[in-house]
Image (cartoon, helix red, strand yellow):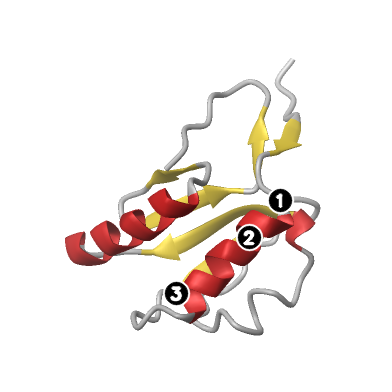
Amino acid sequence: MNSYHPYPVMNNTKWEEIREVMCNNPTHFQWRTKDIETGYISMWDAEWYYHFSLGDYKYIEWLEIKADTKELRKNLLDILEKIHVPGKVLEDAIRVYGYADTRSYVDYI
């Protein structure tokens, strides 16, 4: 049996913390999200103030923030470590999980 059993690992407070720090950051990090219900992956966007908060946070399976250089990755990791969010470092982005699978371990940044 190979079924996906998601459970929430983020809440609105944590999503708002990310949104607020990104709104106030001089680097315009691009982001995209995956919808937990539809599987839709949004286009890359850099507008955090309105666009990121348009949808309901409860539908974000994951958030990816583009960090395609060592300097951007370090800057972004410093930010996310202070918030302490579930996620992982990818090749050119950092993924923050809104949901995790009961069959797998999720580490925190």
The amino acid on which the numbered mark 1 sits, given as a three-letter code, is Asn
> Badge 1 local density, few (<14 within 10 Å), some, or many (20+)?
few
Foreground disc of the pair 2, 3: 2
Identify which residue, 82 or 34, lies in the foreground. Answer: 82
Q: Position of residue 107 (x, y in %)?
A: 47, 32
Relative to 2, say whether 69 is above or below. below
Q: Left or right of 19: which side holds 8? A: right
Q: Position of residue 60 (x, y in %)?
A: 69, 56
Please give the residue where the numbered disc 1 appears in the rendered image.
11
Label 1, label 2: how far apart the Cα atoms are: 6 Å
- Disc nearer the start of the sequence (2/3): 2
Can residue 41 be seen here? The reply is no
Q: Quadrant of the N terminus?
A: top right
> Badge 2 local density, few (<14 within 10 Å), some, or many (20+)?
many
Disc 1 vs disc 2: Cβ atoms closer than 8 Å? yes
Identify which residue, 13 or 36, lies in the foreground. Answer: 13
Relative to 27, say whether 13 is above or below. above
Q: Left or right of 65: which side holds 27? A: left
Please give the residue where the numbered disc 3 appears in the rendered image.
30
* Residue that protrudes farthest toward the top in the picture: 1
Q: Residue at x 64, y 65 (%)?
A: 16
Q: Quadrant of the C terminus?
A: top left
